[in-house]
Amino acid sequence: MKSVYVFTLGCQMNVYDSEQIVRLLHPLGYSSVDDPEKADLVILNTCSIRQKAFDKGFSFLGRIKKRKKDNFDVIIGVGGCVAQQEGENILKRAPYVDFVFGTSAIHRLPDLVRRAENGEKISDTTEDGEVIETGGNPNLPDEITPSGFVSIMRGCNNFCTYCIVPFVRGREKSRDPNDIIEEIKRRSLKGMKEITLLGQNVNSYGKKDDMPDFPDLLHMVSEIEGIERIRFATSHPKDLSDKLVDCFKDIEKLCSHFHIPVQSGSDRILSDMNRKYSVKHYLQRIEALRKVCPEIELSTDIIVGFPGETEKEFNDTLSLLKEVLYDNVFAFAYSDRPGTRAQSFENKIEDAIKKERLNNLLDIQNEITKNKNSAFMDKTVKILVERQSFTDNGTLVLNGRTFGNRIVHVEEPLSTLFENKKFKGEIIDVQIVKTLGHSLKGRLSEVKS
């Protein structure tokens, strides 16, 4: 049997796409391996949202070049957002690459691989007029995991001035709800208990396609037997409706976590970013969420050093951070992305200043997260066990997440009580015995029957 190694960069959507890549190649005789040195086919699934991810992708290709030199029969493919953006330029920049496929070409991958096996050089970045998700194909094998992703829509219509997604993922298109439900049902029957619904802006699902809206879809998913936890990402604050907020009150399976990117605490910067909401509106949405679900855990995205950002405007972002008290923050220094409006903006911030601001923000948030985690000390929480393993000395190691979104690690000395017990995929009670900066440590309490 032939083998494939997929190197994934970027967002959860890319993780989902990589899963579909492996599924699609199975009928061609490919099985997944964890080492590119042992693979007959190496695929890089790229991300172009930030310069660092862009550079990391080409760095990986540089390393894999030697593999091609040592074994000419090895096939190398590049997919994802950079592939959509660069197309044939990748074949020119890295002539040892055999084929390039864009974000809308994943379902055509089997044909592209067959052609590459026959020595053809290919670049396919053609966009489709509808969402074609291979996850809906019941004839392909599923990876059996307790928690997984399902794409509900593709593309974005918002055109934030810093963001390349609309250019590499295309315009917003919603997937047929029946197809989504059937995929989740199928995976639930195979043991999946937690599902994360994915889209560039899930809040606008169905609005332009005469379909059920996103809250309606959440209610549909909640009725699927076997699914015990529902998550979603990502949401745009301008489209966060009261109907969606009420889902946290009405849907028992909906996890008490909301990722709601703010990007900046300055109204002027938000306007320059084309975010279409104010800080006041954003805070009102946070208040509404906490009113219906006081225990909700909040995370966000923040960009520091956007062109023209003054020290005061950066301090406004820090003030927002301290007011909202997020449970987790993903913060990044601004970097120009080709083709975006912000690339042409003047008053770019020096790298040293961006780095200083980023470190300042992260220091404050790390302290907030640490204090939030400390509140869990000695409490008993329920976690869905996503991984189970044993150390060399026989210690049982479990990893999972709470109903909110906190990562919990459990270590138990091996005993006859645990050695034959299957915890992976189970929801168990864990007593927190130690709190860390970004995770919790616990001891087993009792297993949910």
Image (cartoon, grey):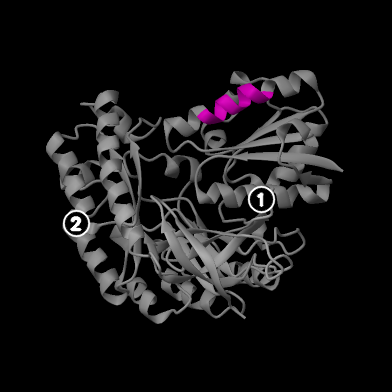
Query: How far is disc 2 from disc 1 in space, using C-alphas?
Result: 42 Å
Identify which residue is drawn at 63% across, 60% down. Answer: 413
Viewer-proximal residue among 367 and 297: 367
Up the image or down, 179 lies above or below 118; here it is: below
Viewer-proximal residue among 58 and 205: 58
Residue type, numbered disc 2 = Glu
Q: Whole-percent x and y of residue 21?
A: 68, 47
**Residue at the disc numbered 2:** 323
Figure quadrant of residue 345: top left
What secondary structure is marked by label 2? helix
Q: Report the magenta residues as a range.
A: 56-64
Task: Name the chief secondary structure element in magenta.
Answer: helix
Residue type, numbered disc 1 = Thr
Viewer-proximal residue among 181 and 145: 145
Q: Quadrant of the N terminus?
A: top right
**Residue at the disc numbered 1:** 391
Q: Residues within 10 Å of mark 2 (few under 14, many from 20)?
A: few
Q: Whole-percent x and y of residue 31?
A: 79, 46
Tell me: 372 left or right of 115.
Answer: left
Q: Earlier in the sequence, mark 2 or mark 1?
A: 2
The answer, for residue 209, to whether it is visible in the render is no
The answer, for residue 162, to whether it is visible in the render is yes
Tell me: 282 left or right of 146.
Answer: left
Identify which residue is drawn at 34% across, 59% down. Answer: 374
Q: Whole-percent x and y of residue 8?
A: 59, 41
What secondary structure is marked by label 1? loop
Q: Whole-percent x and y of residue 170?
A: 48, 46
Q: Which mark is residue 21?
A: none
